[in-house]
Image (spheres, rainbow, N blue to C red):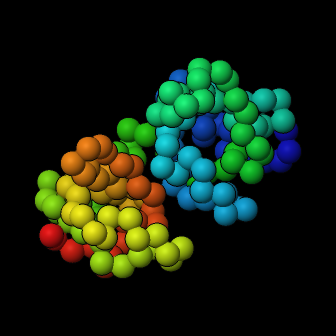
């Protein structure tokens, strides 16, 4: 094992083994994978890498066990259940209402600006919206209250 910080991280994440988890922030290399899709935490390799299985994208990746690079073993994970829980934000007060983005993300993403979506939940790190065909879990790039209006 690398160091005390890694041991602390693994001890904390070990409580989530067998649960779906999702990232709250990108890795130190700005990798945003798994900030909008949950994975099932299965355990850790001897060098501290996360062993997981896809859940929300299992139709695409199948049911095999995979391992993440060591940069993903950090404190930026929460349970998927917690990520979907609404609470404590200005956006969460609009739960159940139609909303529309008025500003693109910092990366220039203009999703949800043309057609309103229904807000299902909003937390500090994630929000869930629904359009006429499906639900979307959005990461913290989308959770700024100032970027949304009631449609």
Q: State the image coordinates of residue 69 (x, y, percent, origin top left).
A: 76, 44
Residue at figure coordinates x 53%, y 24% from the top left: 18
Q: Pick the residue in front: 63 or 8.
A: 63
Q: Pick the residue in front: 89 or 8.
A: 89
Q: Quadrant of the C terminus?
A: bottom left
Q: Quadrant of the N terminus?
A: top right
Q: Is residue 46 left or right of residue 89?
A: right
Q: Pick the residue in front: 18 or 129.
A: 129
Q: State the image coordinates of residue 15 (x, y, percent, origin top left).
A: 55, 32
Residue at figure coordinates x 43%, y 40% from the top left: 80
Where residue 119 sits, quadrant-wise, is: bottom left
Residue at figure coordinates x 50%, y 27% from the top left: 59
Residue furthest top as drawn: 63
- In this view, 78 is above or below 123: above
Where residue 11 sits, quadrant-wise, is: top right
Residue 133 visible from this viewpoint: yes
Residue at figure coordinates x 67%, y 23% from the top left: 65
Where residue 73 sits, quadrant-wise, is: top right
Residue 145 visible from this viewpoint: no
Q: State the image coordinates of residue 17 (x, y, percent, origin top left).
A: 57, 27
- In this view, 134 is above or below 25: above
Q: Pick the residue in front: 138 or 5.
A: 138
How many discs mark residues in the rendered view? 0
Q: State the image coordinates of residue 89 (x, y, percent, origin top left).
A: 28, 65
Q: Is residue 51 left or right of residue 77?
A: right
């Amino acid at each position: 094992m690398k160091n005390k910080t890694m041991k602390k991280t693994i001890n904390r994440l070990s409580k989530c083994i067998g649960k779906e988890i999702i990232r709250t922030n990108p890795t130190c290399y700005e990798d945003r994978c798994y900030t909008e899709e949950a994975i099932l935490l299965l355990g850790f390799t001897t060098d501290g890498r996360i062993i997981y299985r896809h859940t929300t994208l299992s139709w695409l990746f199948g049911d095999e066990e995979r391992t993440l690079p060591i940069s993903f073993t950090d404190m930026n994970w929460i349970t998927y259940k917690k990520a979907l829980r609404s609470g404590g934000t200005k956006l969460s007060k609009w739960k159940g209402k139609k909303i529309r983005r008025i500003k693109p993300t910092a990366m220039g993403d203009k999703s949800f600006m043309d057609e309103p979506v229904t807000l299902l939940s909003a937390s500090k790190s994630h929000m869930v919206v629904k359009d006429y065909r499906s639900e979307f879990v959005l990461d913290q790039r989308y959770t700024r209250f100032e970027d949304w209006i009631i449609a």
